[in-house]
Image: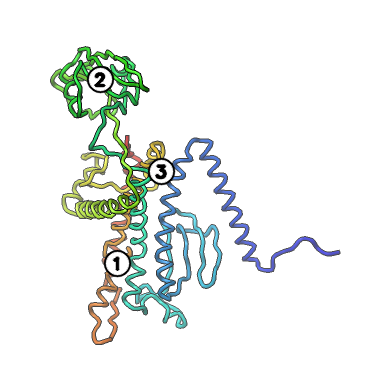
């Protein structure tokens, strides 16, 4: 009688199938738990960041294969192998520790031992243009992603014009002890403000000045709501006597100051395909320039001092343009949770900033970053003469290599410390 149970001849093939099955089951269960606990949005944002890592390494992979180099491994994450499959000469797979990924190309430096039959296709034996292309491919991928995100934000999704507030209620604030005057008077988000005490305001910025000058007084608002005109009669409170959540406690109010509890709505601007592309080019350049300045500030004497103060609670925990704050996986999950609640626009803005920052930081000309390999390739090209290729001795760069490892380790540990002890709150 024929045995209906077919056992694969290749034990490795069976192991790969079992590993893939475990991986799929784990992903499905994880998504199910995230959905039940209300954290699906957080998982989606974190997954988008992980996809960026995959695309970064895919940039190296494609550039290397197009250059004729041998690629032996392409893995997402580090540590023990969860699953892998071999296609041609390359093993593709997933590992356990979510700390990045790698694309293994033999002969990245002169210190690496390479099999004789692979030497001709190693990284170090390729021409300068090919080595340069492979080195910058990862960061170039981040800038391509950043550009595509900007096109989406400028085009179909739209950018919020915070510089042009509309005469419309877009936010209503409560007091720590109860309803604000705006809530008590019946304001709603979307109310269009027509007149205030019989006066018409064309610029929202003039309205807070008017309110602050009238503490404890009734103000007559004429508004339009769903095509109907209404009159609301809120009585302002003195800001010195109330506690407003989220307001800077260091901004002490000494003079009588009126407070109502309304904020403006901001229009969303959407451009056509051509306008979205041209605007994105300029914005990408401006954001890149700003990020370069921020990175320079971070590694300056003043930046190191400010970061030390942040660690020892002598400075603000919230990052700024002058003083960035690195995120550990813990901080990333927390930030992802917050932005996922605010919609697609905020999620894309977060991914935009991450792509530009990672793309630039990865080009710092020190090993083990990609910028270190690019710098070596450029140095070798400049030292080559009369068709004779110069090979740099990477052994002389090892002190700088170990120093950079220490810096990266310090940034990783310190960011984890900050994310636990002084968690970042974007609200």
Of 320 and 199, the residue lying toward us = 199
Residue at image point 47% right, 64% down:
74
The kind of secondary structure element at disc 1 is helix
Q: Distance between the residues labelled 1 and 3?
A: 30 Å
Mark number displayed over residue 260:
2
The N terminus lies in quadrant: bottom right
- x, y (%) of residue 168? 29, 27
- x, y (%) of residue 6? 74, 63
Mark sitting earlier along the chain (3/2): 2
Q: Distance between the residues labelled 1 and 2?
A: 56 Å
Crowding at mark 1 (Cα within 10 Å: few <14, some 14-19, many 20+):
some
Mark number displayed over residue 372:
1
Q: Nearer the viewer, mark 3 or mark 2?
A: 2
Of 208 and 91, the residue lying toward us = 208
Crowding at mark 3 (Cα within 10 Å: few <14, some 14-19, many 20+):
some
Vertical side of 399 occupied by 280: above or below? above
Q: Does 291 sit left or right of 190 as displayed? A: left
The kind of secondary structure element at disc 2 is loop
Task: Give the residue at mark 3.
Answer: 333
Residue at image point 43% right, 67% down:
61
Mark sitting earlier along the chain (1/3): 3
Q: How far apart are marks 3 and 2 (CA)?
A: 35 Å
- Rendering colour mode: rainbow
Vertical side of 325 occupied by 6: above or below? below
Q: Determine if residue 243 is in view.
A: no
């Amino acid at each position: 009688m024929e045995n209906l149970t077919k056992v694969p001849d290749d034990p490795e093939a069976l192991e790969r199938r079992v590993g893939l099955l475990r991986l799929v089951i784990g992903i499905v269960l994880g998504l199910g738990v995230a959905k039940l606990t209300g954290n699906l949005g957080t998982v989606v944002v974190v997954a988008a960041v992980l996809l960026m890592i995959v695309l970064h390494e895919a940039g190296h992979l494609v550039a290397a294969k197009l250059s004729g180099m041998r690629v032996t491994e392409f893995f997402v994450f580090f540590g023990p192998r969860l699953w892998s499959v071999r296609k041609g000469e390359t093993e593709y797979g997933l590992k356990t520790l979510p700390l990045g990924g790698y694309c293994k190309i033999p002969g990245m430096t002169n210190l690496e031992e390479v099999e004789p039959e692979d030497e001709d296709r190693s990284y170090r034996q390729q021409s300068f243009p090919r080595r340069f292309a492979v080195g910058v491919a990862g960061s170039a991928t981040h800038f391509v992603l950043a550009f595509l995100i900007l096109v989406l934000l400028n085009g179909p999704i739209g950018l919020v014009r915070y510089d042009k507030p509309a005469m419309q209620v877009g936010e209503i604030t409560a007091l720590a002890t109860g309803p604000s005057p705006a809530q008590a008077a019946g304001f709603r988000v979307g109310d269009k403000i027509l007149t205030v005490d019989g006066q018409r305001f064309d610029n929202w910025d003039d309205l807070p000045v008017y309110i602050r000058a009238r503490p404890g007084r009734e103000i007559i608002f004429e508004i339009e709501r769903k095509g109907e005109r209404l009159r609301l009669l809120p009585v302002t409170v003195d800001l010195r006597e109330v506690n407003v959540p989220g307001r800077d406690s260091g901004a002490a109010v000494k003079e009588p100051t009126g407070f109502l509890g309304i904020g403006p709505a901001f229009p969303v601007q959407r451009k056509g395909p051509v306008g979205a592309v041209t605007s994105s080019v300029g914005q990408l350049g401006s954001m890149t320039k700003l990020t370069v300045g921020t990175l320079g500030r971070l590694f300056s004497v003043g930046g190191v001092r400010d970061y030390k103060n942040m660690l020892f609670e002598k400075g603000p925990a919230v990052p700024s343009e002058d003083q960035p704050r690195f995120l550990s996986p813990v901080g990333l999950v927390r930030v992802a949770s917050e932005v996922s609640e605010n919609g697609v626009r905020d999620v894309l803005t977060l991914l935009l900033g991450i792509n530009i920052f990672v793309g630039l930081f990865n080009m710092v000309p020190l090993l083990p970053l990609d910028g270190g390999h690019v710098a070596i390739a450029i140095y070798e090209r400049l030292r080559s003469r009369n068709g004779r290729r110069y090979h740099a001795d990477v052994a002389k760069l090892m002190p700088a290599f170990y120093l950079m490892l220490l810096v990266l380790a310090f940034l990783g540990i310190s960011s984890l410390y900050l994310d636990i002890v002084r968690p970042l709150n974007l609200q």
